[in-house]
Image: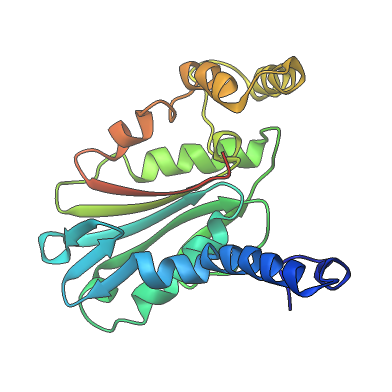
């Protein structure tokens, strides 16, 4: 099975096949399964995420939070890796919360199917519950976060605006021709969880944010 859907029609000679195979290998190297095999490892009491290491013996509890399109798959892989370890991090894993636009099943994570590109009551309710649940963590807690594209809409709790207001604002931004960076510069000033605010909510827990983006 090829990542390039029209591979066979494009591979009309040997030179094209070589180029197409290079592209296929590039796609294969960034699949979630490959990324978590090489860049997310747990050995003894050490969790290593790329070049960052976390001493798991320093934490009593481990939580997992995911938001954005694709975050459910990422969290599914992480949950399976953690629960496969009988002692250590497996004993400390308390579960967590995930919101995505596609259905997913978990053993210990609470899942909500949200909406994108416009926010909804489901998105707002999920974010409120996340704030309420993780506002009182301690230095002995470790929070793993997966952030994917669309997370700025799926994880949303404005300071004062209503859902209707936020739908109107996001619709206007989408129609404005602004880049995603420009839109997020506005969104972060309206939100209780953007622009570093989520980190403040989780503090003083240690947070590790795994970012997956096509930007």
- Residues 129 and 176: in front is 176
Q: Is residue 84 above or below residue 103?
A: below
The residue drawn where x is 53% and y is 62% is: 30
The location of residue 131, given as percent across then percent down, is: 40, 38
In the picture provided, is 126 more to the left or to the right than 78? right
- Residues 202 and 31: in front is 31
Quadrant in the picture for residue 37: bottom left
The location of residue 39, given as percent across then percent down, is: 36, 64
The residue drawn where x is 24% and y is 54% is: 142
In the picture provided, is 59 more to the left or to the right than 89? left
Q: Is residue 210 above or below residue 21?
A: above
In the picture provided, is 51 more to the left or to the right than 17? left
Q: How many marks?
A: 0
Give the quarter of the figure containing the C terminus: top right
Query: How is the structure coloured here?
Result: rainbow
The location of residue 195, given as percent across then percent down, is: 40, 25
Q: In this view, does 78 lie above or below 174?
A: below
The location of residue 23, given as percent across then percent down, is: 64, 63
Hey, which residue is sitting farthest right in the picture?
A: 9
The residue drawn where x is 31% and y is 59% is: 50
The residue drawn where x is 16% and y is 60% is: 59
- Residues 183 and 119: in front is 183
Give the quarter of the figure containing the N terminus: bottom right
């Amino acid at each position: 099975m090829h990542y390039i859907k029209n591979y066979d029609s494009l591979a009309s000679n040997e030179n094209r096949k070589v180029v197409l195979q290079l592209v296929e290998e590039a796609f294969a190297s960034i699949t979630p399964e490959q990324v978590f095999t090489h860049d997310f490892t747990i050995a003894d009491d050490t969790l290593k995420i790329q070049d960052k290491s976390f001493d798991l013996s320093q934490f009593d509890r481990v939580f997992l939070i995911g938001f954005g399109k694709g975050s459910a798959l990422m969290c599914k892989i992480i949950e399976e890796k953690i629960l496969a370890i009988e002692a250590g991090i497996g004993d400390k894993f308390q579960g967590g919360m995930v919101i995505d636009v596609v259905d997913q099943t978990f053993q210990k994570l609470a899942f909500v199917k949200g909406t994108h590109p416009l926010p909804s009551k489901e998105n707002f309710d999920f974010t409120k519950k996340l704030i309420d649940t993780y506002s009182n963590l301690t230095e002995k807690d470790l929070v793993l976060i997966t952030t994917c594209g669309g997370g700025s809409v799926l994880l949303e709790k404005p300071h004062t605006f209503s859902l209707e207001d936020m739908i109107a604002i996001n619709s206007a931004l989408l129609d404005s021709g602004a880049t995603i960076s420009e839109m997020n510069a506005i969104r972060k000033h309206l939100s209780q969880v953007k622009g570093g605010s989520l980190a403040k909510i989780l503090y003083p827990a240690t947070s590790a944010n795994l970012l997956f983006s096509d930007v």
